Image (cartoon, helix red, strand yellow):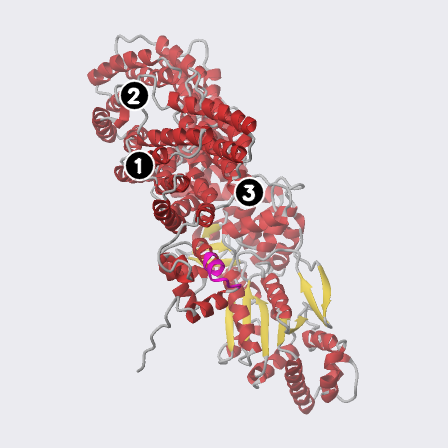
Amino acid sequence: MSTSRAGEEKVGSVQQASSATPVVGRDGELTRLCGVLERARGGEARAVLIAGDAGVGKTRVLDEVGRQAAAAGMTVLTGHCVDLGDVGLPYLPFTEILGVLAADERFAGALAAHPVVERLLGAGTGSVGDVDGRLRLFEGMAGLLTEVAEVAPLLLVLEDLHWADQSSRDLLRFLLGRGVLRHRLAVFASYRADDLHRRHPLRPLLAELVRLPVVERMELRPLADPDVDRLVRALEPRPLPDATVRRIVERAEGNAFYAEELLAATDTESGGVPSGLADVLLIRFEQLSEMAQQVLRTASVAGRRVEHDLLREAAGLPEAELESALREAVGRQLLVAGEGDTYSFRHALAREAVYADLLPGERARLHGAFARLLAGRGRPESAAERAHHYRESHDLPEALAASLQAADHARRVGAPAEEQRHLEAALDLWTAVGPEARPPGVERVTLMLRASAAAAHAGELHRAVSLARSALAGLGQDADSELAARVRYTLAGNLLSVDSLTAAFAYSSEALAMIPEEPPSPTWVWAAATHVLAARHVGENETALEVARRALGVAERLRVTDAQADLLISLAVFDGEGRRGLAGRQLLVKARELARSSGNAPVELRALFNLAMGCYESGALAECVPWLTEGLDRARRAGLLSSTYPLEMRYLRLLVLNVLGRWDECVRAAAADADVLPAAGGYTMGPALYVTLARGDFAAADRARALLEGPFDWMATLVAGIVLTDAAALRRDPEDAVRWMRATVSGLIDESGTRPDVTVRLAALALSAVADAASGLRSAGDDAGAGRWTDTATELVEVARAMAVRDDGTPQGPEGQAWLARAEAEWIRAVSGPDAAAWARVVTAFGYGDVYERARCRLRYAEALVAAGRREEAASEARAVRETADDLGATPLREQVDDLIRRGRLSDGPGSDGRAAVLTAREQDVLRLLALGRSNRQIGEELFISGKTASVHVSNILAKVGASSRGEAVAIAYREGLIAPEPTTSG
C-alpha cells in the first residue's frame, strides 16, 4: 500500500489529484474546510494553514476538499513544494499553478493581461530579480488570481509549505497580506509540523500570517484508533484477523501512512519495521550529529520513554554533552520532553527503526547497562523492565528472577494479563537456567498452576486449560497427593469454563478421590466445591447437592470462609427455587459477605453475578442493576474485568439496557467494552447486536456468524443463534429461521441431554417466520403448502412448551413465560390465523419490562384486531407501536406498522389526512430543530438520542411531507403550518 497519487485526471483544464486511500476520521476537518469554500464562493474568502505530522493525512484531506470544490464548480489549482535541499527552485509551486492555467483556454485572456507572470514559465522578457521586478511579479500574480476567480470561484492549494523556497514564501506573504482574499478565492496551504525545528525559515512566516484576520490555522491530529481500524479494513479487500488489525492500529499510533505501510508488510514481515518505512524514519535521524545519534541509539534500548538520569548513566556522557545532544534531537522533533525529566520518541516506530539499526553487540551491551542501572535502584515496579533487559543481554538467571518479581508485582496491583505474561516468560526461561541458578522454593508445576489461574482471570480461558494440562503432564510419579489433587481440580474448573463438561467431571472426580475427607483439609474442600459444579453440569444433581452439603460442613469447621461462600452459592443456585427464590437470594447475600471478608474476589464476583441473574430471571430488572454495578466495580478494583463472571455481568448489563429500551446507552456501553474485552468476551456484545438488527442493520448477522468461529463457546453460540434466527425471521425466511433455531439448540444441549432455557425464545422467533409463511400460502389458496408449515409450527410450539417448565416442575421466570405466550400465539397464527385474545396475553406477559418485544407483539395484536374488525382499538395499538419504534430507532418495526396502517386504513383521528397528524411528537421536535438548521448530530444531542436515530426521524419526516431535502421539508412545514416560526427578540 502506498500514499502516492493513484493518478491524475483532468477536470476542465485543471488537474485534480485523486488518492487511492479513503478519507476516514476527518469529518470535522472536512466540514470546516468545506464551510470556508462555501463562504469563498459567496465572496467571503479566507486562507487556512493546515498543520500535521508527515503521513497523518494532509494530502488525503486536501484531495477530498479539492474534489468537492471541483464538483461545486470551483477552479482548483494545486502547487507542490519539493525538498531540493539548499538549491531551491524559486517560485516552484506557483510555476506549477501557472502551467496549469496556461493549458486552459478559459484563462488565456487573464494571462495575456498580466504578461509579467509568464516570465516564471520562461516566456516574455525582462528580469524579476530586482526589487521593482519582484514587486511587478507579485502584483501581476495577485491580479491574475483575481481575474481567474472572476471566471469561477478559485481554490488555491499549496502543499508541503515546509519545503517552500524563500521566493515562494515571500509571494505567499504578499498575496495574503495585500487583500487578494477579498475575492471569490480560498487558499489552503499545508505543512509538516514535525519538520519545523526552532530555526526553520517557515516559522516566522507562519507567526506573521496567523495574525492576519483572513488567515486561520487548523491542525490535523493523529487519527483515533477506531478510525485507523476502519482505514485498514477499507484498504484491504480480504478479511483480516482482528489481532492483525489491532497490532497495526497500535503501532501506527494514528498515522495513516504508517498504517498503510504496516498493512502492506503483513504478508512479508513477521515483525519489526517494514524496510521502506524504516528508510523514511531514519532519514531525519541520520541528519543529526554523531553524538545526538548515539544518545538516540541508547534511548531506543531503554524503550519508548527514558528518564534523564538513567539515559545519562547508560550513555556515559557528561551532562553538558548530553544536554547538547538532547537539545538537537528535541529540536529535530525526534524526541519529546515529558513530565518528570523524561524523554520519549515522538513516534514508537521511529524508536523501532533506530533500535533495529543497532549492531548486535552494541544492543546486548546497552541492554545489560540498563538492567544493572535499574537493579541498583531497587524499585519493584521496574522488575518487568529489568527482566526484559536481562533477557536481551543474555543474562538468563537474572532474567528468570526478575520475571518472577514482575509477576508478583502484577498480582499485587491486580493485573492478571501481565502476571500471566511474566509467568510464561519465566516458564520459557526455566529449562535454560540450571537448577543451581533458579530461585529457591519455586517449582515448575506450581508456576504452571499460577499461570493457569492468571490466564483464567485475564479471560484467556483456553490458555488456562492448556497451562493446567501442562501442569498435569509435569507431575512426577512421586508427586505430593495434595498438589496432584490441586492440579486436577484446577484443570476441572478451567474445563468447565470452556464447556468441556464430561472431562471436567472426570478430573474433579479424580481430585476428590486422591485425598481423604478425614482428616479434613482445605484442599479436599476445594476439590469438593469444584466437583459440585462439574456434577451439576453433567446432570448429576443428587451427587452435587450431597457433596455440597458435606463439604459445607467441613468448610465451616475449618473456617475456610471463601470455600464456604462458594459452596453456599452452589446450594443457592441448585436447590429449591434457586436464585430466583427468597431463600436462594438470602444464601447468595451471605456468600457475598463471606467471600468479601476472606478477600476472595472471584468467589465474591460469582455471588454478585448470581444475585443479578436471580433478579433478572424473576423480572425485577431495576433490582438487577445495583448488583451488576457493584460486581463490575469490584472486578475493576481487583483487576478481574476479563474473567468469566464479570464478562457474564457485562453481557447482562447490556441485556438489561436492551430490554428496558435504553438502546443508545446499550450501544455506547458495548462500544466502550469492545476496546478492553479479551478474545473470549466477544459474546458480551450480543445485546448490542440485537439492537443493531432491530434497527435494520443486517450486518449484525455477519458479526454474529463471526462469533461461531474458533473454539466452541456456549454463550457465543447462544448470542449468534438469537441474532441469526431473528434475522431470518425479519427477512421472512422460515427455512433459515428454523435451521438456525435447531442448530443453536443442538449446539447448546449439555452433556446430560438437557436443552437450554433459551430454546423457548428461539422457538418463538422461528415460529414468527413459519407463521408468516403459512399465512401467506393460505391467503394465496395453497392449503397444502400452508399445511406443511403448520406441521413445523406444531413441532416448534411443543418444544417451547416442554422447555418452559424445568425438570423439577418449576416454570421459567417471567421472560420465559412471555416467550412461551408468544410461541403459542404464533402457532395459532400459523394454524388458523391471528387471534386477538392470544396476542393480548402476549402483550401482558412482556409487560415485565421488555420494551421492544412488547411493541412487536402489540403490532401482532393490532393485526389481529384489524382482522376481527376492531379498527379503533387497532389504530390505538398501532399508534403506540409507531411511537415506540421511533423512540428506539427500530426502522423495520416502524415500516411494518406504517404498512399495517395503510393496509388496514387505520385512522389517526380527526385531521388524519393532514400531514401534521401523521408526524409523531418526537418527529415534531426533530422538525422544529431542522428549521433551526441543526445537523443530525446536534438534533441527537439536544433530544438525547443518537445521531443515527435522528437521521431516521429526518428520513421519516421527508417521506411524510413529500420533500426531497431538509430545506424543502422545512419550507413545506412553514407553509402548511406544521411548525410556527421561532419568535424573535429585540434588544
Q: Which amino acid, by three-letter code, is at mark 2?
A: Thr
The quarter of the displayed image where residue 807 is located? top left
Residue sticking out furthest to the bottom? 132
Quadrant (top left, top right, bottom left, bottom right) of the C terminus: bottom left
Depth check, mark 1 against mark 3: the one in front is 1
Q: Which amino acid, by three-letter code, is at mark 3?
A: Arg
One can see residue 715 in this view: no
Q: Residues within 10 Å of mark 3 (few under 14, many from 20)?
A: some
Among numbered discs 2 and 1, the one appearing first in the sequence? 2
Depth check, mark 2 against mark 3: the one in front is 2
Q: Which residue is mark 1?
A: 844
Q: Which residue is mark 2?
A: 810
Q: Residues within 10 Å of mark 1 (few under 14, many from 20)?
A: some
- Tag count: 3
Q: Main secondary structure of the magenta part?
A: helix
One can see residue 566 in this view: yes
Instruction: Name the foreground residue: 82 vs 75.
Output: 75
255 to 510, vertically: above or below: below
- Report, in whole angstroms, how far the alpha carbon at label 2 lies from the one at label 1: 21 Å
Q: Is residue 352 magenta?
A: no
Residue at 78% over, 81% down:
122
Classify residue 126 as left or right of residue 788: right
Q: Which amino acid, by three-letter code, is at mark 1?
A: Thr
Classify residue 79 as left or right of residue 486: right
Q: Which mark is residue 365?
A: 3
Among numbered discs 2 and 3, the one appearing first in the sequence? 3
Among numbered discs 1 and 3, the one appearing first in the sequence? 3
Q: Which residues are magenta?
A: 956-964
724 to 353, vertically: above or below: above
Q: Secondary structure at mark 2?
A: loop
